[in-house]
Image (cartoon, rainbow, N blue to C red):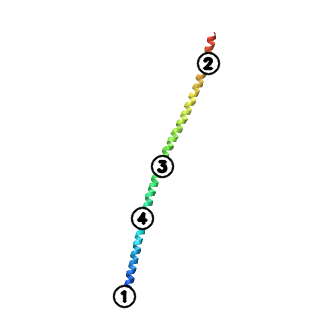
Amino acid sequence: MQWEQLLEEKEKALEVEVEKHRGQLDKVKQELEHAVKTRNIKESELLETIEQLRAQLDGQSTTISDLEGNVDLLEGGMQVLNQQITTQSHEMTKVQQQAAIRIRY
């Protein structure tokens, strides 16, 4: 009888320990699932941010290319204007010289 009681107490103690470990296992499993879920959310947010930054960089690269084209165009326009100014300056000098010669005679 005492032996049976010891066996029964042993079984109950084993059941208590098994349930305790199952509870701990379930808790650890839930924590792990939560950590994985959180990591996946953060990874998704980072990938989205990376895509947004890429799009922004592409847009800025296009803007820079457009601005470089505008600078080249403006430099060409300035060269043409400088040539025209030089040509008109020479023509004005000739006109002044011709006028001075006509005034003398």
Q: Secondary structure at mark 3?
A: helix
Work out which quarter of the rendered image holds the N terminus and state it: bottom left
The alpha-carbon separation of the residues under discs 1 and 4 comes to: 43 Å
- Crowding near the residue tagged with mark 2, few <14, some 14–19, many ≥20 C-alpha atoms within 10 Å: few
Residue type (three-letter) at the residue carrying disc 2: Lys
Q: Residue at x 46, y 49 (%)?
A: 52
The alpha-carbon separation of the residues under discs 4 and 3 comes to: 30 Å
Q: Position of residue 4 (x, y in %)?
A: 37, 87
Question: In front: 66, or 17?
Answer: 17
Foreground label between 1 and 2: 1
When asked about the image quadrant of residue 13, the answer is bottom left
Q: Are marks 1 and 3 in contact (CB under 8 Å)?
A: no
Q: Residue at x 58, y 22 (%)?
A: 88
- Crowding near the residue tagged with mark 1, few <14, some 14–19, many ≥20 C-alpha atoms within 10 Å: few
Q: Which mark is residue 94?
A: 2
Q: Secondary structure at mark 2?
A: helix
Q: Which residue is mark 4?
A: 33
Q: Is residue 8 left or right of residue 50?
A: left
Work out whether mark 2 precedes mark 4 in sequence or the reverse, and give the earlier one: 4
Q: Which residue is mark 3?
A: 53
